[in-house]
Amino acid sequence: MTKRKSSAIVFDLGQVLVRFDYKHFVEKVNKHKAGIGEQFLELYKKNYDVHRDFEKGLISEKDFIAQMLEYLEHIIDEETFCRYWADIFSFNENVIALLPDLKKNYKLYLVSNTNSIHKKYGYQDYEFLKLFDYLFLSHEIKFIKPEEEIYRAVENVSGFPSEEHIFIDDILEYVDAAKNIGWDGIQFIGYDDLVTNLKARDIL
């Protein structure tokens, strides 16, 4: 492949640096009422625009929780919902372990479609996040991937030309959106493949 200069490495959070699985949420609420977890997920997926609007900061945390508690027939309270709904994450340790070495030579940025509840009750205090120069969280900047504005927000902070950014995300659509504005991109399908791609670019 043609070598290009990279100055900023931009990571996705979910399913790249941390794994998440809503089965943990389903199991917890099912202990309150059998089958309610599956019912919740069905309604959640059917009304995914509510989730997206929450990620974009277009609806308030209070209104989002109220809607979710409706789906759950109010079997739990607000605080319990937030704790259960954010208790879905686990570390992708081998990918996280790459960050300190990458930080020696590159600016590191995080771009995530996420929300205030997952931040506050989930990943907010993860130590590895301190390695990033800036966190671009969709609910805070009001744009989500694959909207061009979220990638431009990174450029505005980094000060580097488009072609000096490389984006790592598990969702191909989001990687392609970055490539469409001149970034390099790697679809994350696993640690070994990521290392191979970074080595091919002389990044590792």
Image: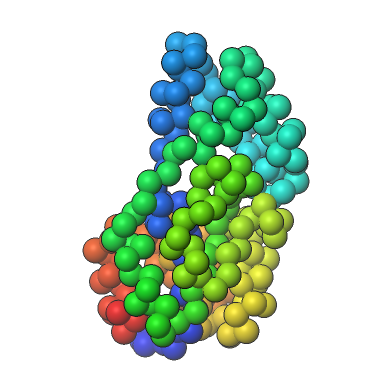
Nearest the camera: 13 or 130?
130
Q: Is residue 1 above or below residue 121?
A: below
Question: What is the tally of numbered marks visible in this picture?
Answer: 0
Q: Residue at x 37, y 73 (%)?
A: 100
Nearest the camera: 125 or 142?
125
Nearest the camera: 198 or 3?
198
Specify whether 78 is left or right of 58. left
Tell me if residue 114 can be seen: yes
Q: Quadrant of the C terminus?
A: bottom left
**Quarter holding residue 203:** bottom left
Position of residue 185 measured from the top left corner of the image (x, y, whole percent): 44, 70
**Quarter holding residue 136:** bottom right
Q: Is residue 197 above or below residue 127?
A: below
Q: Is residue 6 above or below residue 19?
A: below
Q: Residue at x 75, y 40 (%)?
A: 60
Position of residue 193 measured from the top left corner of the image (x, y, whole percent): 27, 64
Q: Quadrant of the N terminus?
A: bottom left
Q: Is residue 172 above or below residue 74?
A: below
Position of residue 170 measured from the top left corner of the image (x, y, whole percent): 41, 56
Tell me if residue 176 can be seen: no
Specify whether 135 is left or right of 102. right
